[in-house]
Amino acid sequence: MEFHHVSVLLNECIDGLNIKPDGVYVDCTMGGAGHSIEIVKKLSSEGLFIGFDQDINAINTAKERLSEYSDRVKFVHSNFENIKSELEKLGITKIDGVLADLGVSSHQLDEADRGFSYMQDAPLDMRMDVRSEFSAYDVVNNYSEDELNRIIKDYGEENWSRRIAKFIVEAREESPIQNTGELVDIIKKAIPKKARIDGPHPAKRTFQAIRIEVNNELGVITSLIRDVASIMNKGGRICIITFHSLEDRIVKNEFKYLAIDCICPPELPMCQCDKEKEVKVITRKPILPSDEEVEVNPRSRSAKLRVAEKI
């Protein structure tokens, strides 16, 4: 299937990275290589681009689209949580910039049999890396009612999480829930009709929550930021695009943590933690897509870009 993906906040990301032609830059989530190709175009033959993606379709697409720049491009088929170890394998110990476009790609949503979309019936999958054995099927059919409630409430910010969890557990007692269509029907039954008027699709938040759980999307953000900050050259930039409040909050708080000296309790007479400031925050408020971009690409509506610079 052709890998279609419209790059979000493209110009803002390239500006945010402040690319040096001979620098080393990493795209943690290549997707359709939209951001990647614009980064590579700014590199000289002395520069280096490393593209990560856990989706093999993205890797194959990027290899094709970046083929004319093969002298300055390397690809890594892995989750960005392994960024330090994977870069070490390539002999890279210092970098000058990192871009991470978090969340699910347009391609993954549009490829029906991946099970990411609540608009198309497919097996309950939602794995970004198909090598993983853990899928949406396991979450939906094996998690307890309390566990389901927790992830749907915390990751989906769904007001009807308890009721949805209860309906899922009751439904699977009859037979395992196999497909996204079955799950959508269960969610629709759980949410009262009056609560669905003028709101998003009733399954949107629950599908988001399950996808986040399957791919541990929130768990890897903090480690990514700390790992890349530790190997970033002075003046290097960290650019991260988020698509919902949970992701954005983690990025905001992590940038804030890395931008302060000393975290000792104020009552201590002198610092004992020896923590030192590592970055300065470039974006006090996140950069949002323009009205024009949202009109052309509605999926960009909730995007937020935050940028920090190594000091």
Image (cartoon, rainbow, N blue to C red):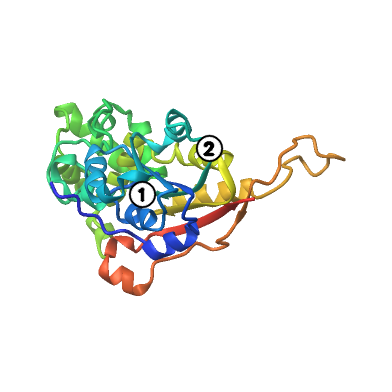
Left or right of 150, for residue 260: right
Label 1 CA crowd tier, 10 Å (few <14, some 14–19, many 20+): some
Q: Give how far apart the Cα atoms at labels 1 and 2 are.
A: 32 Å
Q: Position of residue 237 (x, y in %)?
A: 53, 52
Residue, far bottom: 292
Upstream in sequence: badge 1 or badge 2: 1
* Residue 298 visible: yes
* Left or right of 24, for residue 226: right
Mark 1: secondary structure = loop
Q: Nearer the viewer, residue 245 or 131?
A: 131
Question: Could you tell me the amino acid type at mark 1?
Answer: Glu
- Kindly identify the amino acid type of the residue bearing the numbered disc 2: Asp
The reply, left or right, for residue 251 in relation to residue 217 is: right
> Horizontally, is 298 left or right of 218 in the view?
left
Residue 9 in view = no
- Residue 85, label in figure: none
Helix, strand or loop for disc 2: helix
The reply to whether callout 1 and callout 2 are in contact (CB within 8 Å) is no
Provide the residue designation for mark 1. Answer: 158
User: Which residue sits at x=25%, y=58%?
Assistant: 196
Residue 227 shows which numbered tag? 2
Pick the front one: 263 or 20: 20
Nearest the viewer among 190 and 150 is 150
Residue 291, image x, y percentages = 35, 73
The picture places residue 137, in percent across and down from the top left corner, at 22, 31
The 10 Å Cα crowd at callout 2, few under 14, some 14 to 19, many 20 or more, is some
Q: Position of residue 62 (x, y in %)?
A: 26, 46
Q: Is residue 291 above or below residue 53?
A: below
Tell me what residue is drawn at x 15 percent, y 33 percent: 178
- Which picture quadrant has residue 198? bottom left
Residue at x-position 21% and y-position 50%: 107
